Amino acid sequence: MATLVGLICNFRQELGARSDATHRELMDWLSNHRHNELRDMIAQTHHLQTEIDSLLRADHARILAEVDRANRVLLDVLGRLDEFKSLVQNSGAQRLVSDQAIDILRQVFESGYGGVAIVRTTSEPRVRQTRDSAIVCFRYGEYGPSINLRESLFAEDDIQTLASLGFLHLETSGNGLRWFKITRSGGDMLQSVNKT
């Protein structure tokens, strides 16, 4: 899929400002560039043709921004795998997800609570912390253990980053508490990172 998306971006770039291209023109372009396997896959999948037509009509700048964001996430994950770590580090790529963010995700996953909440200790006496706020594991009205943080100053930013990348999903409890539930993508990413 990554190859197909990259080729669609290349095709769109060659078209310039034109936004009326269809999957048929892409298939001709793929043939001319000797990507016959991808062309055949598109030809055999009607839903893929429809999605490609939609993607070709979308704003090119927005698509490129989303592809860039996906590439940064992929580089971040690859940079944590032993086989790719030095390659990514030597490429000069910046980390999108901090080590603490991965650690927060790991603690939530291992706690069995499935979520994390940022609670203000002054308004929630059941949470014992010395700071004004605490990051705790949470599931539907039940507080779990506090998250161990290396850099508490950046904890909320790390949680927001995980949410913006789809690794956590914002939920609201019955009493209005906002909390972040781990997503399947978050679990999958954590499993990839845990293989190192």
Image (cartoon, rainbow, N blue to C red):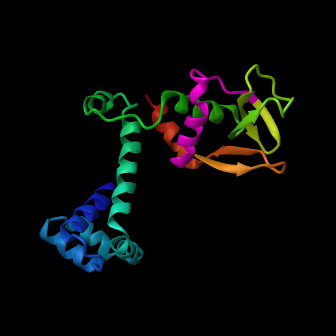
Q: Please give the name of the residue rendered at 66% of the width and 45% of the height, measured from the top-left corner.
A: 181
Q: Is residue 66 left or right of residue 120?
A: left
Q: Please give the name of the residue rendered at 14% of the width and 65% of the height, measured from the top-left corner.
A: 34
Q: Position of residue 193 (x, y in %)?
A: 46, 34
Which contiguous range is marked in magenta?
145-167
Q: Position of residue 20 (x, y in %)?
A: 29, 80
On screen, 62 above or below 101?
below
Q: Position of residue 195 (x, y in %)?
A: 45, 31
Total marks shown come to 0
Q: Position of residue 46 (x, y in %)?
A: 39, 78
Q: Please give the name of the residue rendered at 33% of the width and 72% of the height, measured from the top-left corner.
A: 56
Q: Is residue 152 left or right of residue 119?
A: left
Front residue of 144 and 130: 130
Residue 162 lies in the magenta-colored region? yes
Q: Quadrant of residue 36?
A: bottom left
Q: Is residue 171 left or right of residue 174?
A: left
Q: Please give the name of the residue rendered at 18% of the width and 76% of the height, measured from the top-left corner.
A: 28
Quadrant where the N terminus is found in the figure = bottom left
On screen, 13 above or below 79?
below
Front residue of 9 and 86: 9
Q: Is residue 190 visible?
A: yes
Q: Quadrant of residue 112?
A: top right
Residue 62 lies in the magenta-colored region? no
Q: Is residue 187 visible?
A: no
Q: Quadrant of residue 53?
A: bottom left
Quadrant where the C terminus is found in the figure = top left
